[in-house]
Image (cartoon, coloured by chain):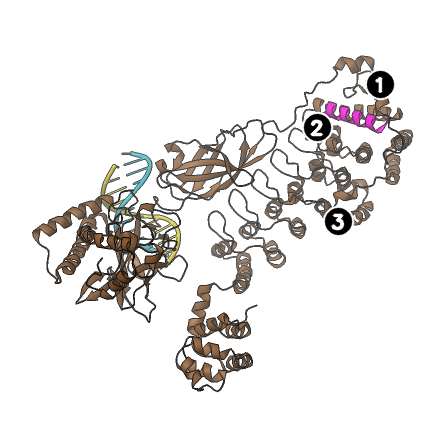
Chain colours: A brown, B cyan, C yellow
Amino acid sequence: MYQIGINTNTMQMNNNLLDEDFQEETISDISDIVNYTLTLSPSMDSPDSVILSPPPSHAYVSEEAYQPLLVSPGPSPETQDITPYLEILEQPTEKFRFRYKSEMAGTHGSLTGRKKRTYPTVQLHNYDKPAVIRCSLYQCNKKETIQPRQPHAHRLVKKRGSDEIDDPHEVDVNINSGFVAKFPNMGIIHTAKRNILPELESKIKKLKSDEIARNEGLIRSLSRREEQEVRGIMGEANKSIDLNIVCLQFEAFEVKNKIYYPLCDPVYSSPISNLKSALTGELKIVRMDLVAGPVEGQQEIFILVEKVKKRNVRIRFYELDNEDIEIWNAEAKFSDLDVHHQYAIVFKTPAYRDLDIKNDVKVFIELQRPSDGARSEPREYIYTPSNRIPSRKRPRLTSDDYSTSSNFPSNEQPPIVISNLSNLPAAQECDYQRPLGQDSTDPNELSLEIQKCLNSLTPEEITEYLTTLDTDAPQEIYQKSVTIMKAQSAFIPFSYTSHPLRNLDSEETKIITDFREEFLAFVKTNPTKKRMSMMLKSLFEKSADVSGNMETVLHLLISENNQNLLPLLLKVLHKYQETDLVNMPNIRGQTALHLAVQCHNILAIEHLLCTKADIAVQDLEGNTAFHIIAMENAPHAILKLLCMVKDEHDHINMVNYDGLTALHLAVKSNNIEATKILCENKADVNVEDKKTGDTILHVAVVDQRLEIVKFLLENSNVNITKENYAQYSPFKLANLLLRKNTPITRQIYKLLEIYMAKFKENQPLSPDDVKEKYSKVKIFTEECLDEVSEILDKSGIWYNLAELLGYDHLVRSNIFASSKNLLQFAMKEKKSIFKIRNFLENLDEFDAVECIDIMVLGKQK
DNA sequence: TAATGATTCCC
DNA sequence: CGGGAATCATT
């Protein structure tokens, strides 16, 4: 090793402690030194790396295992305690903007550690004398070649005043500094293409002369032959160089007579890539045109992206199962021409693996960069079934059957809707007869009531009569008692809130007329519950078949805001719990509930819900009843009613095919009441718009809805800092909107500013913040001193504290009369308060620790 | 040429 | 400072 003849201490130690095998290896290494010195860089495949490289499992190995081959195996357990090695305590950031020389005027950001306000830091282990740690800029050979690392042509500079100091940067370490070297305030200068060779040459020359000095013990200039050699290496270095990725090299030296003798192998940081380059820049989908589409694929989608390279980007669709395991993937198709500049891509969706899905399927889209395998954050996409409307083409009796054999009084025209009610097989009818008492619903009861209706056919009378008809809501479908609502709605006349949706055409009117006739006639036959069900089903399906929009009678009655037959039908459906019929969608995927909500028909809604209408059904735009009501300026009672339904699956937060929740729609349509009600009913205020990543707070800010912003801040847990896909937080947006310079934008910004401050206050301080705050406090306040010393006097722990502070000898000679004495003495000695605090923490003196924390950090908790 | 990279400039 | 854009250079 290099320390042979330099550091006899360690060598002797080695000899004493090493087993024979190891010694053999050590000796054979001497030949490797030659190898090392010639290549100016350690040969990683040589056995010496086994001895000298850092121990395994330290953080210095980047998690991505960027270049596994260059990470040396760690030393064996018996060697790691005695051989010097470098450990990287703080890796540099992964991304950093390399600046050109011309950009270096003024101060730009400096290279930090992985966390803010830290800096690349290394520690030298197993060495006890003063040493020098060097940091310089190296290449990150990603090729799987086992060649030595070469210096990088970029410059690692430290600013001192107006001039820049080039690498290598040196830090002296010793016992006092704990052999820790921190490298702050460094920047990376992107050397221009034309200067790369000269830069490399000078760096390599410098290394060469260091090496000569080390070998020959004196500093001299290079010989012709050596210059030639340098040029050769330079060529190599130039060939392998990647101008957008660098890493830091750390070396430890013992310096004698200005000659640097390495103490161990250099270590290399994880790669730092240039933030400005499209080759290494972050892949990101910033915005999507569409977030849902047909299973068959071939849907054209526009996405905005962060800078990409045309031929170095792919769009991948994939699906995860419940355990987050990828079970399907496919690539979207697009050509070079579909990549607009470097910021937008237009592509066609791939077909989903199963074209016959019955329900929506959620998948993900991501960008991928083949060159380095980098991926973007995924975005959600929904495949929608192509045949969402269940086929009504089920086998049924032909028209002949009902037109010929109907024994109901028929009009001039054969009724369209009339089905085969009278043809129900008698045998079946027998089967449907249930023993009385098996069901709480007495089949005869209803028909009697309806018969009464028959006799009093004026609408007014029907309406009046219906108020007496009892329809118990199955309470279990509500999460809260529905009685309050009922009490409210009882005072609302049936037509009070509702309005027609549209005018029915003649065919539709006929459907209703025929239905009415058929239905009432059927009731006369005093049917059992099962027969009634069959009849209704038959009539509903008939209606759906005949009407242009596949609408059931129920749809039609709601649409025309029918005042007499509708209430009757609703009660019947309710009474018989015809959930399936109630959930039948029309051609646009709308159920009766969708329409009832649009018509503000509160009583219909209530009945439908009591018939267990599904609040999660999405129409062809993906809208649930919640979405619809959120856009409507409807009576509050309606939304409240919907919110009362038990909702274990969070249907209130469902996203439509525009990627929006009901809350989004409420805010977008400035529907303050709906916004409030949804929020009060545990709708998630932080769900993002799947196209843009906007939360409702983003929307409220951009649309300048002061009242909504205010409400959200005061009454919900909106995240002011949550960024949308374009990396704007609501706060930042508010700030940008200040440019409009209107009173409202100013008010909104002010409001957010206040909550931002509150938010920051509540943030737990990061360990770094704590350190920083502590570093500013040098002495105890009187108050804190008294308090802490009282605690310590009581517990007697201050003896242990004194020990930890290195005052054990003073304690033994009874110099300190009390803990207050001790603390005052420590302050005089300039012991850091942070140190004292941490000692106390180790001693489980948490009360004292809290005292000090309060003094330094201000009020916490 | 048009697209992509490199460099400089600007707020 | 960090972000972006203008401008020059190369492919």
Of A695 and A391, nearer the camera is A391
Q: Give the range drawn in magenta.
A: A526-543
Q: Is residue A632 left or right of residue A140?
A: right
> Pointer 2: what residue?
A551
Residue at 21 percent of width and 49 percent of height: A196
Image x and y of residue A164, in percent: 25, 62
Label 2 marks which chain's residue? A
Could you tell me which secondary element the residue under label 3 belongs to?
A: loop
Q: Is residue A1 left or right of residue A276?
A: left
> Pointer 1: what residue?
A427
Give the mark nearer the N terminus: 3 vs 1.
1
- Marks 2,1: beta carbons within 8 A: no
- Asked where in the image residue A510 lies, by quadrant, the reply is top right
* 3 vs 2, front mark: 3
Residue A530 part of the magenta-drawn span: yes
Three-letter code, disc 1: Ala
> Pointer 3: what residue?
A480
* 3 vs 1, front mark: 1
Is A339 drawn above or below residue A405 in the view shown? below
